[in-house]
Image (spheres, rainbow, N blue to C red):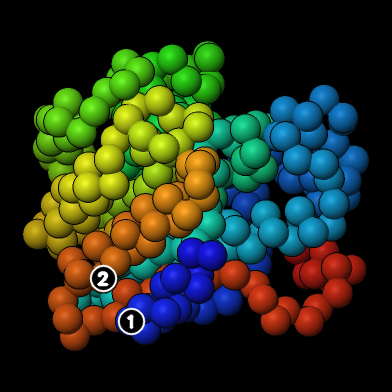
């Protein structure tokens, strides 16, 4: 639904998501965990923690989701050599995945994989994660714990999942029913520390489960509040010429159309923030892929 909404706008460069290479995923995750997931041999308890039943389709979706964020990171840096660089994916933001286990419908941590891949290639030294999903980015915080090269910032519901929080570099725990004004003041107060870190790229986890209509969020933001949130982050990066990667994150509104509209607004604000001569790159789905599962799995090996 989101892809169709953005296609109808006619201003986005939507491309199929490539599969993330196995060697890139191994930069952020334990190889035995990766192999167990790919082969379908993870213990039942590990799959219950992830929340999805195992299937070949889940394996393909997971590697494509991570691949979309990884490709978006490369595109953002490439665009930044000419203009301000911003790219994103209609997936990703799987911030509950830890180094050796998944959780909360997150198998691999796409943002961590992308950061480690860019660092491993010598393209960046310092990165920042701005995670504004209603749930704390616990897996991201854990992976980058005590890593001075990555700043992790999570602003989330204090009483929401996960019950056991990790320690980000910046954590802002918000009470239930926080509205637009208090939320935006907290964000405005925190962002100067992010920019002061002088990151060479920012990963924006732009979950929209903070909406008032969201059945899991409980923070009571309006659609206009979310638009102002997105503008604060993206305009701040734009004026400092910091490349940005946008990942989708969560959204569970009833009706679901409210989630779709909010996600679409994030990408529209990104497009408006870009110089009119530059088209933002949005890495999308793998529709049309004709390779069978065996060949795909072999390529990951």
Labels 1 and 2: the sequence-earlier one: 1
> Would residue 222 be seen by someone viewing this image from the given angle?
yes
| Image location of residue 104, percent across then percent down | 62, 32
Say left or right for 147 vs 253. left
Q: Residue at x 56, y 34 (%)?
A: 96
Is 208 placed above or below 17 here? above
Residues marked 1 and 2 touching at CB (< 8 Å):
yes
Q: Residues within 10 Å of mark 2 (few under 14, many from 20)?
A: many
Find numbered disc 2 in the image and state the secondary structure of the residue it sits on.
helix
| Image location of residue 45, percent across then percent down | 82, 25
| Image location of residue 217, percent across then percent down | 44, 30
Q: Residue at x 15, y 56 (%)?
A: 235
Q: Quadrant of the N terminus?
A: bottom right
| Picture mark count | 2
Is 219 placed above or below 274 here? above
Please tell me which residue lies in front, 55 or 175: 175
**What residue is pinned by disc 2?**
271
**What residue is pinned by disc 1?**
11
């Amino acid at each position: 639904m989101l892809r169709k909404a953005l296609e109808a706008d006619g201003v986005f460069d939507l491309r199929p998501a490539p599969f993330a290479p196995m060697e890139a995923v191994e930069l952020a995750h334990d190889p035995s965990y990766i192999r167990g997931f790919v082969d379908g041999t993870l213990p039942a308890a590990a799959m219950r923690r992830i929340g999805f039943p195992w299937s070949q389709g889940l394996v393909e979706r997971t590697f494509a989701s991570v691949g979309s964020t990884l490709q978006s990171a490369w595109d953002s840096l490439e665009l930044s050599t000419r203009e301000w660089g911003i790219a994103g994916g209609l997936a990703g933001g799987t911030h509950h995945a830890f180094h050796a286990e998944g959780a909360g419908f997150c198998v691999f941590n796409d943002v961590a994989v992308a950061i480690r891949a860019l660092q491993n290639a010598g393209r960046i030294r310092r990165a920042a994660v701005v995670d504004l999903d209603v749930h704390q980015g616990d897996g991201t915080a854990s992976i980058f714990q005590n890593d001075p090269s990555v700043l992790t910032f999570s602003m989330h519901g204090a009483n929401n999942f996960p019950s056991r929080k990790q320690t980000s570099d910046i954590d802002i725990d918000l009470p239930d029913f926080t509205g637009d004004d208090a939320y935006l003041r907290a964000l405005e107060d925190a962002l100067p520390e992010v920019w002061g870190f002088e990151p060479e790229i920012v990963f924006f986890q732009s979950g929209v489960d903070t909406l008032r209509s969201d059945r899991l969020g409980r923070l009571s933001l309006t659609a206009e509040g979310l638009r102002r949130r997105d503008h604060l982050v993206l305009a701040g990066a734009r004026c400092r010429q910091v490349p940005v990667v946008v990942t989708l994150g969560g959204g569970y509104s009833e009706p679901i159309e409210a989630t779709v509209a909010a996600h679409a607004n994030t990408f529209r604000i990104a497009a408006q923030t870009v110089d009119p001569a530059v088209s933002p790159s949005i890495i999308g789905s793998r529709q049309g892929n004709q390779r069978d599962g065996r060949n795909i799995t072999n390529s990951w090996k």
